[in-house]
Image (cartoon, rainbow, N blue to C red):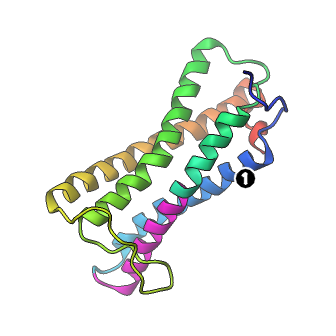
Amino acid sequence: MPPLNAAPRYSAAQRRLHWLMFLLVALAYLCIELRGSFERGSWPRATVVQSHYWIGLAVLALALPRLLLRLRRGAPPITPPLPAWQAWPSRAVHGALYAFLLAQPLLGLLTAWTDGKSVLVPFTARVVPALVAPDPAWAARLEDLHGSLGSAFYWVIGLHVLASLYHHAIRGDDTLRRMR
Protein backbone atom coordinates (compact mmCIF):
# COMPACT_ATOMS: atom_id res chain seq x y z
CA MET A 1 0.00 0.00 0.00
CA PRO A 2 1.49 3.40 -0.90
CA PRO A 3 2.03 5.94 1.89
CA LEU A 4 -0.88 8.25 2.58
CA ASN A 5 1.41 11.26 2.37
CA ALA A 6 1.43 12.42 -1.26
CA ALA A 7 1.94 16.08 -0.31
CA PRO A 8 5.26 17.79 -1.01
CA ARG A 9 5.89 18.13 2.74
CA TYR A 10 5.69 15.92 5.79
CA SER A 11 2.43 16.27 7.69
CA ALA A 12 2.19 19.02 10.29
CA ALA A 13 2.30 16.41 13.08
CA GLN A 14 5.43 14.80 11.60
CA ARG A 15 7.14 18.18 11.28
CA ARG A 16 6.24 19.22 14.83
CA LEU A 17 7.47 15.92 16.27
CA HIS A 18 10.69 16.12 14.25
CA TRP A 19 11.60 19.59 15.52
CA LEU A 20 10.40 18.93 19.08
CA MET A 21 12.53 15.80 19.25
CA PHE A 22 15.47 17.68 17.75
CA LEU A 23 15.13 20.20 20.58
CA LEU A 24 14.78 17.51 23.24
CA VAL A 25 17.79 15.52 22.00
CA ALA A 26 19.87 18.72 21.89
CA LEU A 27 18.78 19.57 25.45
CA ALA A 28 19.56 16.03 26.67
CA TYR A 29 23.06 16.32 25.22
CA LEU A 30 23.47 19.81 26.70
CA CYS A 31 22.42 18.64 30.17
CA ILE A 32 24.81 15.73 30.22
CA GLU A 33 27.66 17.91 28.95
CA LEU A 34 26.90 20.50 31.66
CA ARG A 35 27.05 17.82 34.36
CA GLY A 36 30.83 18.09 34.55
CA SER A 37 30.60 21.83 35.22
CA PHE A 38 29.18 21.21 38.68
CA GLU A 39 30.64 19.60 41.78
CA ARG A 40 29.60 16.02 42.55
CA GLY A 41 26.76 15.95 45.03
CA SER A 42 25.77 19.56 44.34
CA TRP A 43 22.20 20.68 43.70
CA PRO A 44 23.00 22.07 40.19
CA ARG A 45 24.62 18.79 39.15
CA ALA A 46 21.66 16.76 40.43
CA THR A 47 19.32 19.12 38.56
CA VAL A 48 21.06 18.71 35.18
CA VAL A 49 21.29 14.94 35.65
CA GLN A 50 17.59 14.65 36.54
CA SER A 51 16.79 16.96 33.61
CA HIS A 52 18.82 14.66 31.34
CA TYR A 53 16.78 11.67 32.61
CA TRP A 54 13.42 13.35 32.08
CA ILE A 55 14.28 14.81 28.71
CA GLY A 56 15.41 11.34 27.64
CA LEU A 57 12.13 9.87 28.86
CA ALA A 58 10.23 12.55 26.93
CA VAL A 59 12.15 11.49 23.81
CA LEU A 60 11.18 7.88 24.50
CA ALA A 61 7.53 8.83 25.04
CA LEU A 62 7.45 10.67 21.69
CA ALA A 63 9.53 8.16 19.71
CA LEU A 64 6.85 5.50 19.39
CA PRO A 65 4.09 7.87 18.21
CA ARG A 66 6.57 9.43 15.81
CA LEU A 67 7.58 6.04 14.43
CA LEU A 68 3.95 4.95 14.08
CA LEU A 69 3.08 8.20 12.33
CA ARG A 70 6.00 7.72 9.95
CA LEU A 71 4.90 4.16 9.17
CA ARG A 72 1.33 5.30 8.62
CA ARG A 73 1.96 8.52 6.71
CA GLY A 74 5.25 7.67 5.05
CA ALA A 75 7.57 10.31 3.65
CA PRO A 76 6.82 12.66 0.80
CA PRO A 77 8.82 11.88 -2.35
CA ILE A 78 12.01 13.83 -2.90
CA THR A 79 11.98 15.96 -6.03
CA PRO A 80 13.98 15.24 -8.09
CA PRO A 81 14.19 11.59 -6.96
CA LEU A 82 17.38 10.33 -5.38
CA PRO A 83 19.70 8.02 -7.27
CA ALA A 84 19.77 4.52 -5.73
CA TRP A 85 23.27 5.02 -4.31
CA GLN A 86 21.88 7.88 -2.17
CA ALA A 87 18.51 6.32 -1.33
CA TRP A 88 19.77 3.32 0.64
CA PRO A 89 22.20 5.32 2.87
CA SER A 90 19.35 7.75 3.53
CA ARG A 91 17.11 4.91 4.71
CA ALA A 92 19.94 3.48 6.82
CA VAL A 93 20.63 6.81 8.57
CA HIS A 94 16.93 7.38 9.23
CA GLY A 95 16.58 3.84 10.58
CA ALA A 96 19.57 4.40 12.84
CA LEU A 97 18.09 7.68 14.09
CA TYR A 98 14.79 5.98 15.00
CA ALA A 99 16.66 3.14 16.73
CA PHE A 100 18.66 5.74 18.68
CA LEU A 101 15.50 7.57 19.77
CA LEU A 102 14.19 4.32 21.26
CA ALA A 103 17.34 2.61 22.53
CA GLN A 104 19.22 5.52 24.08
CA PRO A 105 16.52 6.54 26.60
CA LEU A 106 15.90 2.88 27.53
CA LEU A 107 19.63 2.35 28.09
CA GLY A 108 19.79 5.51 30.19
CA LEU A 109 16.89 4.43 32.37
CA LEU A 110 18.34 0.94 32.84
CA THR A 111 21.71 2.49 33.66
CA ALA A 112 20.19 4.68 36.37
CA TRP A 113 18.22 1.84 37.90
CA THR A 114 21.06 -0.72 37.87
CA ASP A 115 23.31 1.93 39.40
CA GLY A 116 20.80 2.39 42.21
CA LYS A 117 20.08 5.99 41.21
CA SER A 118 16.65 7.48 41.70
CA VAL A 119 14.73 8.97 38.82
CA LEU A 120 12.60 11.65 40.45
CA VAL A 121 9.25 12.89 39.22
CA PRO A 122 10.01 16.54 38.34
CA PHE A 123 9.29 19.07 41.08
CA THR A 124 8.43 16.39 43.61
CA ALA A 125 10.20 14.03 46.00
CA ARG A 126 8.53 11.04 44.33
CA VAL A 127 10.71 8.42 42.71
CA VAL A 128 9.87 6.40 39.61
CA PRO A 129 9.97 2.79 40.86
CA ALA A 130 12.91 0.85 39.50
CA LEU A 131 11.95 -2.18 37.44
CA VAL A 132 15.35 -3.81 37.86
CA ALA A 133 17.52 -4.39 40.90
CA PRO A 134 20.76 -2.50 41.40
CA ASP A 135 23.71 -4.35 39.90
CA PRO A 136 27.01 -2.43 39.80
CA ALA A 137 28.54 -4.67 37.11
CA TRP A 138 25.57 -4.24 34.79
CA ALA A 139 25.41 -0.54 35.59
CA ALA A 140 29.01 -0.07 34.45
CA ARG A 141 28.40 -1.99 31.20
CA LEU A 142 25.17 -0.15 30.48
CA GLU A 143 26.71 3.23 31.28
CA ASP A 144 29.59 2.51 28.89
CA LEU A 145 27.15 1.43 26.17
CA HIS A 146 24.89 4.46 26.77
CA GLY A 147 27.89 6.80 26.62
CA SER A 148 29.37 5.13 23.53
CA LEU A 149 26.05 5.20 21.72
CA GLY A 150 25.60 8.84 22.69
CA SER A 151 29.04 9.69 21.31
CA ALA A 152 28.45 7.74 18.10
CA PHE A 153 25.22 9.57 17.53
CA TYR A 154 26.89 12.94 17.58
CA TRP A 155 28.31 11.72 14.27
CA VAL A 156 25.07 10.22 12.94
CA ILE A 157 23.13 13.37 13.81
CA GLY A 158 25.88 15.46 12.23
CA LEU A 159 25.71 13.30 9.10
CA HIS A 160 21.93 13.78 8.99
CA VAL A 161 22.31 17.57 9.23
CA LEU A 162 25.11 17.69 6.64
CA ALA A 163 23.12 15.50 4.25
CA SER A 164 20.09 17.78 4.51
CA LEU A 165 22.31 20.81 3.79
CA TYR A 166 23.92 18.96 0.85
CA HIS A 167 20.49 18.19 -0.58
CA HIS A 168 19.37 21.79 -0.19
CA ALA A 169 22.49 23.73 -1.20
CA ILE A 170 24.30 21.42 -3.65
CA ARG A 171 21.80 18.94 -5.05
CA GLY A 172 19.01 21.51 -5.05
CA ASP A 173 16.22 19.07 -4.21
CA ASP A 174 13.34 19.60 -1.80
CA THR A 175 14.59 17.33 1.01
CA LEU A 176 14.99 20.12 3.53
CA ARG A 177 11.85 22.02 2.45
CA ARG A 178 9.73 18.92 3.14
CA MET A 179 10.44 19.34 6.88
CA ARG A 180 9.77 23.10 7.09
Q: Is residue 87 above or below residue 23?
A: above
Q: Is residue 154 visible?
A: no
Q: State the image coordinates of residue 130 (x, y, percent, origin top left).
A: 32, 68
From the image, which quarter does the C terminus lie in? top right
How many other residues sit within 10 Å of disc 1, few (<14), some (14-19) or many (≥20)? some
Instruction: Name the residue that disc number 1 marks.
Output: 16
> Is 52 covered by the magenta stretch?
yes
Q: State the image coordinates of residue 18 (x, y, percent, origin top left).
A: 66, 48
- Near-viewer residue (71 or 87): 71
Find the residue positioned furthest to the top. 84
- Near-viewer residue (22 or 170): 22
Extent of the magenta region: 41-59
- Near-viewer residue (2 or 45): 2
Residue at 32%, 47% in the rendered image: 148
Q: State the image coordinates of residue 134 (x, y, percent, origin top left).
A: 20, 66
Q: Is residue 156 above or below residue 166?
A: below
Q: Amino acid at mark 1?
A: Arg
Q: Is residue 122 above or below residue 111?
A: below
Residue 37 appears left or right of 6: left
Q: Is residue 75 visible?
A: yes
Residue at 30%, 60% in the rendered image: 111
> Is 13 covered by the magenta stretch?
no
Main secondary structure found in the magenta portion: helix
Residue at 71%, 27% in the rendered image: 170
Find the residue positioned furthest to the left. 137
